[in-house]
Image (cartoon, grey):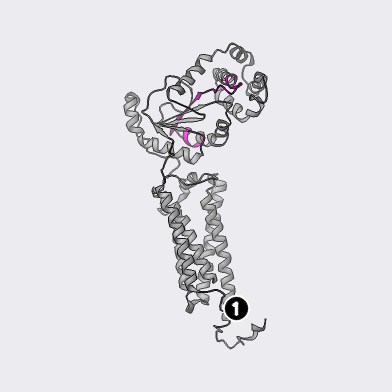
Amino acid sequence: MTRRQILALLAVVGICIALYLTLYKFGVIGVLSCSIGSCETVNTSKWSMLLGLPIAAWGLGAYAALLVLAIVGGSESREESVPIAKVLVALAGFSVLFSAWLTYLELFVIHAICIWCVTSAALWVVIFGVCLADLRAVSRVSR
Amino acid sequence: MADKGVDGGRGRRPSVVKKQRGASPQRFYVVLALVVVAGGLFLVRAARAPKVRANVTTAPITPAQAEGYLMGNANAPVQIMEFADFECPACGNFAVITEPDVRNRIVNTGLASYRYFDFPLPMHKNTMAASNAAACAADQGKFWEMHDQLFRNQPEWNTEATDNPKKIFLGYVKAMGINTDTWEKCFDEQTHQSRIMANQAEGNRRKVQSTPTFVIGTRLIPGSMSYDVFKAYVDSAAKEAPAAAAAAAPATAKPDTTAKKPTTK
């Protein structure tokens, strides 16, 4: 499996998590399955909305963008495209920073941890690692 | 290593060189489809899952015939009752782990009132003494402090630990700044025995069968639970509250603050 195929798979996993939290926020899912922490405290706090949309919906958008980039960039003709690799690194880098800020809010402002949010943050760290490896590899090839 | 010179710096991309291993698109799409299906099933299951627990029963709201011990505003939109035994470990878990959040985020925000009812179980030898200790502390306005001490320190005074729990309770009483003589007289004379029995009778009347059991709005929910689950019950009771409150106590109808979630923007 190529790096970008791996990214596409990770993006789908992320989409499921973000969709789960988004559906909860829109009232489709009644109670979050949350064995550790207080998912609901986090997801009903004032920090759970940004510009009128749930944070989870923004995450959903980011994962969807990652999926599109990974699939488009994973096609044979674009497999070694450096611009796509750069956009991937930028997207993942931004998401890692954003998730870090959200995790900071959970720990020090809301004083509650949402295990799904932390999982998503960890997922972005992994995705960022794969994106960096991808950029390094394609830069080396195209040099 | 031998591959290193292949691209030769000619600026042409050696597309055959760095072909990644195992890049079969078919296999990728199969795996991708599997992940999508698994995620989809998870989401469908989550959306279809019952929003409350299965063993919950619904009963009409009837005013309690015993007073219990009140925390918060008695006229709050949602009424919560807890039937518990001071010596029961599950009650202790709830009191130590979940209840602080319930107090801060539900009771102190005015969303609900909270009443504790003694439901002493016969197999716990020291629980009646604990209920008495708490009732006597209540005389001096320290019921909840004593409640917290008792639950937090169950292993110090429970059936396994001692035959003379009073000695341990006296330690708590002193630490709390309660008048020891008054408390001791009350404890020894079992002044509040009838109050405790009335609390227990309230539980029997509501068919409580295990501890802890909660009544949240119209629902009777056995068992300890996490804050999230607890909050979900309170929220659903708050939605039903205006009608129920109007039926139960028209004279004390509250302004329409019932639908407001304190932590939601």
Residue shown at 52%/44% (left/top)? A38
Q: Nearer the viewer, residue B225 or B208?
A: B208
Residue shown at 53%/76% (left/top)? A82
The image quarter in which residue B188 lies: top right
Asked whether B106 falls inside the magenta stretch, the response is yes
Residue A56 seen anywhere in this rendered image of the structure: yes
Residue A62 seen anywhere in this rendered image of the structure: no
Residue A131: percent from the left, percent from the top?
55, 68
Element at label 1: helix
Q: In this view, does B113 lie above or below A22?
A: above
Residue shown at 61%/27% (left/top)? B149
Residue A129: percent from the left, percent from the top?
58, 65
Q: Is residue B80 shown left or right of residue B243?
A: right
Q: Nearer the viewer, residue B214 or B77?
A: B214
Q: Quadrant of the C terminus of chain B?
A: top left
Residue shown at 42%/46% (left/top)? B49
User: Disc 1 residue type?
Assistant: Arg
Q: Quadrant of the N terminus of chain B?
A: bottom right
Residue A133: percent from the left, percent from the top?
59, 70
Q: Residues within 10 Å of mark 1 (few under 14, many from 20)?
A: few
* Chain under callout 1: A
Asked whether B219 falls inside the magenta stretch, the response is no
Q: Which of B210 and B83 is in front in this view?
A: B210
How many numbered marks does the figure carry? 1
Q: In this view, does A39 lie above or below A18?
A: above
The image quarter in which residue B204 lies: top left
**To which residue does mark 1 refer?**
A140
Q: What stretch is highlighted in magenta?
A: B104-130
Residue B173: percent from the left, percent from the top?
63, 21
Q: In this view, does B242 lie above or below B165?
A: below
